[in-house]
Structure formats: structure tokens, C-alpha cells
Image (cartoon, grey):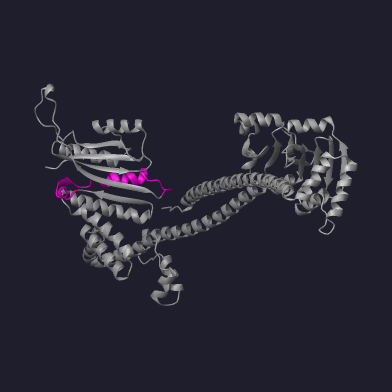
Amino acid sequence: MEIKGSKQLYHKLFFIYTAILVCVISALVIFFINSTRKRFLEQSLRYTEMMSESALSYLEDSSDIAEYIHEDLYNSGMELKDVLHYMTDEPDQYQKYRLDTYIENKLNGYKGIEEFFQDAFQAYGSLSQITLFSYERDEITEYTRDGKSYRRDGDGEFKERLENGELVQEGCFAYLKEIRDPSTMQGKGCMLLGFRSKKFESIWQYYSRAELMVYHDSQTVVYTSSKEHEISDIMEAENKGELEILLGAYVEQAQHGQYHTISYIEKGRASAVPFSIVVMLVLVGIAVMALGELFVRYYLQKLANRLNRILDGMTKVMDGDLAVRIPIDSLLDEERLPAGHAFRCALGYKKEDELDVIARYFNEMCAKLDKHIKKQYLAEIEQKNAEMDALQSQINPHFLYNTLEAVRMKAICNGDREVGKMLYSLAVTFRAQIKEADIITLAQELHYCKKYMELFEFRYQNQFQANVECPEEYLKVPIIKFVLQPVIENYFIHGIRMKETDNFVRIIVEKEAERRYGEGAGHKEADMCEEGYRIIVEDNGKGMTKEAIEAKNRELEHDTMEKHSSIGIANVNRRLKAVYGKECGIHLETGSQGGLRVILRFMGGN
């Protein structure tokens, strides 16, 4: 008889493992690419926000500097008088005033407007130029950082710019400060403090992924890194709240005075992953897949060799050779190690898989068949039956409970009271399931519920609070067991807000008010829930919509809930109706703090 080898199983397993490996690695590569895309998106949004903050900070600093210079001018009497005379006097009169003032203050030193502005240039590096405009003389004087000044007559273009509030020039944006005579409060002229707009280019280059635009209320652009959109379109879209739609980007906006900053990054570019990173992830995936294929091939080849040894042994047995023995790999690994049971176990070499079990059982079978041939069949069969009975014995539930209690006491003796408390709560719940009668007291039900919630307190530490309110006279009221645990479990599965720490569950026991049917309807008997009770379980979790609650209540009332939806609550509702009557059961309401309120009605006399 021809015995086939293990090649068919080898190819089948190789195909299955390869398919699983491809699916898993492909999923991991896709996951890492998506995670990288998400990180790039977060980084781009953070850079866009930081760019906006940096540009706004520069505007605020420039505005503060302009305000400081203006205040210093008014706080310096000599410089202020010099400016007022400069703006109102003719050149020869102004020079006479400066000469007289210098002679008068030669001991203390004379300081005019040129020195004041030069000190301002030295103090503030971002200040690029200062322009004075005299209303009476209609004259413009520009001061630069190199200490030079340029005078010219006021032209129509300059005046028109002042009237329209256009304070932006090429490479410069300015703040307008009025200069008035303190004695009459009449405006004598104005001062334009110009600052370098090139700073915005440095900010944009530092955060190069996003685009930056700075403009004035007069529709003049201070700086823009992209000239794709017109400033008029930008301002119109901003007023309509459609700026993100126009730019097709994530936008950060800010404003300081008459200046606006817009930093944005296109949505496609924000989450774009560099091609080199994608290639790297794909190459890593291919490398991992190659290593996985080598491991799978090695493992399956080893498995095939072991199967072939078993098949060869079976072939020899079929030929009548009962002396054949199949080598067991776990025993071979043990023999290669130094002597000492503890050393072998520590290294984890003493292991036995299914094929070793088959080989061992095969060897035992051959030995027993050999003994059977030697007329020891009956004794060996009895021994085998005794062994099988021992292997098939089941663990007694009480033994498991007692063992769990022993583990708890060991944990307490070792000082781990928290683990002991968890084991105690689990043991109490387990004991209630295997020992308690179907009808217990309300005190027992609440006790088991508390122990059940204690297990969740260890799982969700510092994330929720539980409170039980039950008058003492209701504690001895009988109730069917395990009506609260499914409701509490339903909250922890569907209702708890994992990202919050103010979750709470409140259990309140109340006695139902006595109710009777209206006599106008012709009924005299008492309502079903007369002398009844209700347990209210309320939380502040995710809750349900009003429509969903109404639909669930209809299903609960007619006992038509689908098997795959809220099985625990449906089961409790069905049991309450079966034991206490159709008027009792479960009813859902919206909680007082946005969660869910579950009301369980039952009769206390059953």
C-alpha cells in the first residue's frame, strides 16, 4: 500500500500562512502610512498656527514700539518742542530756535529730533524709517537708519495715502501717530513709523510648508508668499466666512489693529507624506515579509519532516514491526541540555506540541499492542480505562471557588491587598452564580452589584464613581437574582466616556406609589405595581437619542428586542415580566445629566 507524504499539507499551510502574512504586513504598512500622514497633518497644522502666532507677535511688537516712541516723544520736553517748531517754523526761524536753545542749554546739552530718532533706530532693530509730515508747512521729512534725512514737499499721492489710511510701502509697513501741541491740543503734523516687512519672509521661510499673507484694511499687501489669489478676493471671502473654501486649505487668521495675518496650507499638501518615507515603509514591509516567508518555510519544512517520520513509523507498523518508535522532538531538545530539571524548565525547552503528543501516543500504542500480543491485553485495557477516566474528570465549580479563595488569601499574605480585593469581588460574583437561590434579598443583589462594579473600578481607575442609595427597610425585600449586573455591564460597554474622568453611576431604590385604575373605566382592582418597587440606574454617559429611547421602550414593552441588540437588558426585562407580571419590567429615560436612566420595576411580595 502506497503512503503519501506531507507535501500536500505543506503546500496548503504554506499558501495559508503566506496569505495571512501578506494581509497582516499590508495592513501594517497601510496603518503606518496613514499614521505618518496623520502626524504630518498635525505637524502642518501646528506649523501653520505657529506661523500665524509669529507674524501676529511681530505686528504686536511693532505696534508697541511705535507706541513707545510716541510716548517717549511726549515725555521728552526738549525733543517735543523741537518737533513742534520744526513743523510750524520756517527753516531760518527753526534754525534760530535751535541755536538759541543750544546756547541756553549748552551746559546740560541740547538734544533735537534727529538725535531722538537716531536713538530710536539704535534701540529697535526692526524700525526701518521715520517720516514726519507738517500740516502747516506741507513738508515731508524722511529719516533713515544711516542717520540721513530727506526733505520734500508734500505731494498729492502722499496726502491721498494718508487720507485713505494706506500705510504700506514697498518693503515697509507703518503706524501713524498724530503730533499735537500739548498747550492747544491742535494737530501740527503726524509721524509715520515704518517697520521692515522682510521679517515676514523670514517667518515664512522658517515654517516653509505653509503660506503666509499679511495685509492692511486698505487692501494693501504687506507681505505674501503666494500671489495665486488677489487681496480683494481674500478680504471678500474672509468677510463671508468662506476663506477656507476659497483657498482649499486649513487656515489660521489673526488681526492686530488694521493689519491682518493669514497663514494657510493646502489640505492635500498638509497630509502629504514624502515619497521617500512611503518607499521606506514599503521596503521595510517587503523585508519583513521576506523574513516571515523564510521563517514560515523553515517552520513548515520542520513540520513536514516530523509528519514524514510519523508516516514512516505507521508504515512499519502496518508491515508488522511493533518495535518501531518515533523520535519526539521535545525529548530530543531536553537531551541536548545539561542535566537538571530546573535548568531545562527555566530555558523553556521542555515543551510538547500536538505532533509530539501523537508520536508519544503512537509509541505507547505500539508498546501496548506488543504487550497485548504477549497476552497482557486485559490488564492494559483496564489501566487505560483508569487513565482515561482520570483525564476526563471535570473540575468541580466548588473546587474552583475554593481555589480562587486560596489564591486571594495568598495575595493578602504577600501584602498585595489590591489583588486580594479584586479576587474577593470576583469570588463573590462567582459564588452568587453557583450557590445562591433564584430568589435573593435586595441587600444581596446590591452587594453582588457593588462587587461587580469594584472589578470595573480596578479596570477604569479614577474614571468613574458609583453610588448606591437604598433605605434600610427595603434591604430585605425579595428579588430574583442578577437583574442589576446586565444593566451595569451595558453601561460599561456602551455608555462610559473613556476620555473623561467625571463618569458616575447612581443606583436608587424606591417604593412605587400606590396606583389604582380610574373608576370611570369600570375597574376596581389595584394596579399590578401597587406595593411594588423600582430600581433606578442612572449615569452621565453617552446616552441615547429620544427616538432611540422610544424605540427601545416599545421593544421592551412588547418583548420584541432583537437578539443581537442589548441581550442582557432584554433578558432581564423578560425575566421581570415572567416573574412579576407584564406591567413590570424595564423602562428607559434620558438622564438628568445627559446620560441614561434605566428603571427596573418589580413586586416585593414574590
The answer to whether residue 511 is left or right of residue 24 is left
Residue 216 appears in the figure: yes
The answer to whether residue 232 is left or right of residue 155 is left
Which picture quadrant has residue 382? bottom left
Q: How many marks?
A: 0
Where does residue 190 sit, x and y in percent of width and height? 76, 39
Give the camera-side residue of 565 and 340: 565
Most extreme residue toward the right is: 92
Q: Residue at x 32, y 55 (%)?
A: 455
Q: Is residue 224 magenta?
A: no
The answer to whether residue 282 is left or right of residue 129 is left
Most extreme residue toward the left is: 524
Residue 483 appears in the figure: no
Where does residue 14 sit, x and y in percent of width and height? 50, 51
Give the camera-side residue of 144 and 573: 144
In magenta, the rendered stretch is: 471-500
**Rendered position, 586 above or below 308:** above
Q: Is residue 497 magenta?
A: yes
Give the camera-side residue of 51 and 377: 51
Which picture quadrant has residue 572? top left
Which picture quadrant has residue 590? top left
Where does residue 247 sit, x and y in percent of width and height? 65, 33
Where does residue 555 sit, x and y in percent of width and height? 28, 32
Q: Where the C terminus falls, by quadrant? A: top left
